[in-house]
Structures are given as C-alpha cells and as structure tokens.
Image (spheres, grey):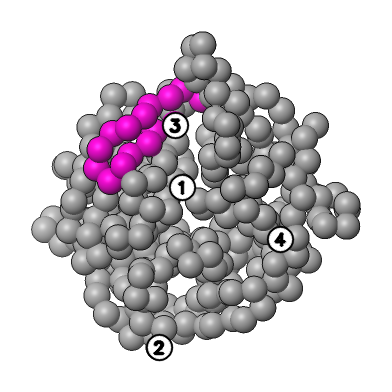
C-alpha cells in the first residue's frame, strides 16, 4: 500500500456536521459553513429564511462572514478573484414562471452584491481564475427537476459568468450526472461523470480529453499527479490510478494510506478529503493537514 505524508496546516477544527460544505478556494484557503445544517423536508422552500456564518481559513487565520436572511441553505461555496464569496443551494425550485434565485454573491462584510439562478440538483461547484462558475449536477438536476420542462442543468455541466449568465452548456455523450470537479485554471477544468465512469478535461470551452476510469463507485474528489497518475477519493478510501496507455483508460492500482510528518497514520474514518489543482487537504478531528501533489511527487 502506498503512503502520502501530510503536514499540519491548521489547528482549526471543522465540525463533523459541517465538513460536507468544505471547499478549497483558488487562493489555497479553506471555506466552510460554520455549523452543519440539514434542511428539513417540512420547510417551505419558497418562504425559508435563515442566518448563516461562513468561515474562511488561511492556516490559523480565520475570517468569518455573517449573512442574514438567506433564502436557502448554502451547501456550495467558493470565492471570486475580488474576494467576494459565492453561496449556492443544491436545489432550485420553479413554480410556473417563478424561479428561485439559488445563488448569491456576498462581500466579506456580509453585503449581498448579486443573486441569480444556477439550477437544480447541484453536485459540485468551482470558480476558475477567470471568474467563470463551473457547476456539475446530479441525477435530480439532469432528469428529475420538479417544475422544470427543460432544466438548465439537463446537460450535467454548465459554465456561468460571474453574474449568472450561461456561457457554456456542453453536449456530452454518455454523461449521466457529474460527481466531482477539479477546477483551478480556466484551461484546466476536470470533471468526473457517470453512469459510465469518465474523466473529462476542458480547456475553457474546448473539449480536450474523455477517458474511462476503472472504478465501480461514484467519486467525491480527484486530482491529477505526474506521469499520467491520479488520486480519487470515495467512501473514506483513497485510490491511486495509473493510465493504461495501451487501452487509454485510468486503471485503479492501489489504495493509499495517509500519515502525518511524524509517521503517524491518519485515519480516514469520519474525515473529509478535498482536492483542487495540486492542493490536497485532509480535514480531521485534530485539525487540517495538507500537501501539494506537484511539482514534487507525493507517492
């Protein structure tokens, strides 16, 4: 079994309930909802209002953004180049001609700067270095959006402008839903789609690569390594993939163990892994651990 060594990056502890909201920003910071928040099915989506706090962590420096009267639970988070924060709901209701504005952009002072529609069934969200918002959608968004005749999410992947205009809506053969995004630069947009397991690369709006991945589960995150290698994370397990150049697909080769800089094993149970660009973050009960996948190999 291969091993990756991580160093302690921050003593900040993200509560277990809030770890599903953790995002890595393009400034290599951690962004998350202060408290976990499960939306009750008894709530009326059209009348819900709530107050929330989001934390932005740069090692042991924490910036808190308090927002008031938000009309949705902010499940997906990221930052723009100017430092403003995007908050989006996973769901987006539509009733007749009325459509929920399920995304808002906030200043660090908690002022709402803009609001717009990103669609229903959001499974992943990331903002590139040109402020384009890349959104991947789950099965609900692709096939089962209630009230939508032709949902904007039906292609499974959409790129929006900073103000919510649709810029790119690719037609992808075999795309069923999008499980994971890894977006750092606009020419390095990587997505994983199913039900056929595919790894897809876009350079801005140009389709560059579509490669099969030998993995029988939906993944939560992935990152590219050197020499046609990849890491993928799912169900508290981390996998190492290697490109099979003869048949041109990513083949699962091994599971990965994590350890800290002192050689102590880091248990993945109840922890969360986030990967973006070359940044690998491990969110644990003891704090946040980190490594960079390149230019130096991690395996």
Q: Residue at x 67, y 59 (%)?
A: 290
**Of label 3 and label 4, which has the lower sequence position?**
3
Disc 2/disc 4 C-alpha distance (Å): 28 Å
Of residues 152 and 168, which is closer to you in this image? Answer: 168
Which SS class for mark 2?
loop
As measured in the structure, the alpha-carbon distance from the residue carrying label 3 to the one carrying label 2 is 38 Å
Estimate how packed mark 4 is, as few (under 14), some (14 to 19) or many (20 or more) residues with alpha carbons within 10 Å: many
Q: Residue at left 75%, top 60%?
A: 7
The mark that comes first in sequence, 1 or 4, is 1
Name the secondary structure under disc 4: strand
| The N terminus lies in quadrant | top right
Where residue 71 sits: x, y (%)? 34, 73
The disc placed on residue 289 is 4
Question: What is the span of residues highlighted in magenta in the rendered image?
Answer: 199-213
Residue density around tag 1, few if under 14, some if 14–19, many if 20 or more, within 10 Å: many
Counting every numbered tag in the picture gives 4
């Amino acid at each position: 079994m291969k091993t990756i060594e991580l160093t302690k990056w921050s003593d900040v502890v993200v509560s277990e309930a809030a770890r599903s909201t953790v995002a890595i920003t393009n400034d290599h910071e951690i962004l998350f909802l202060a408290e976990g928040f499960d939306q009750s099915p008894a709530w009326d989506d059209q009348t819900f209002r709530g107050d929330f706090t989001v934390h932005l962590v740069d090692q042991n420096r924490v910036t808190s953004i308090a927002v008031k009267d938000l009309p949705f639970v902010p499940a997906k988070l990221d930052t723009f180049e100017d430092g403003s924060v995007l908050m989006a709901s996973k769901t987006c209701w539509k009733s007749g001609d009325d459509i929920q504005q399920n995304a808002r952009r906030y200043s660090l002072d908690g002022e709402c700067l803009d609001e717009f529609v990103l669609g229903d069934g959001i499974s992943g969200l990331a903002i590139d270095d040109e402020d384009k918002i890349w959104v991947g959608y789950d099965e609900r968004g692709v096939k089962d959006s209630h009230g939508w005749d032709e949902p904007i999410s039906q292609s499974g992947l959409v790129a929006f402008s900073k103000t919510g205009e649709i810029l790119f809506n690719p037609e992808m053969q075999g795309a069923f839903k999008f499980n994971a995004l890894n977006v750092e630069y606009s020419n390095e947009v990587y997505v994983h789609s199913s039900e056929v397991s595919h790894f897809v690369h876009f350079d801005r709006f140009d389709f560059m690569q579509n490669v099969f991945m030998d993995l029988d589960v939906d993944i939560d995150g992935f990152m590219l390594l050197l020499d046609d290698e990849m890491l993928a994370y799912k169900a508290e397990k981390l996998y190492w993939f290697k490109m099979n150049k003869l048949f041109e697909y990513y083949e699962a080769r091994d599971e990965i163990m994590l350890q800290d800089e002192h050689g102590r094993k880091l248990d993945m149970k109840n922890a969360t892994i986030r990967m973006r660009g070359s940044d690998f973050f491990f969110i644990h009960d003891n704090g946040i651990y980190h490594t960079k996948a390149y230019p130096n190999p991690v395996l």
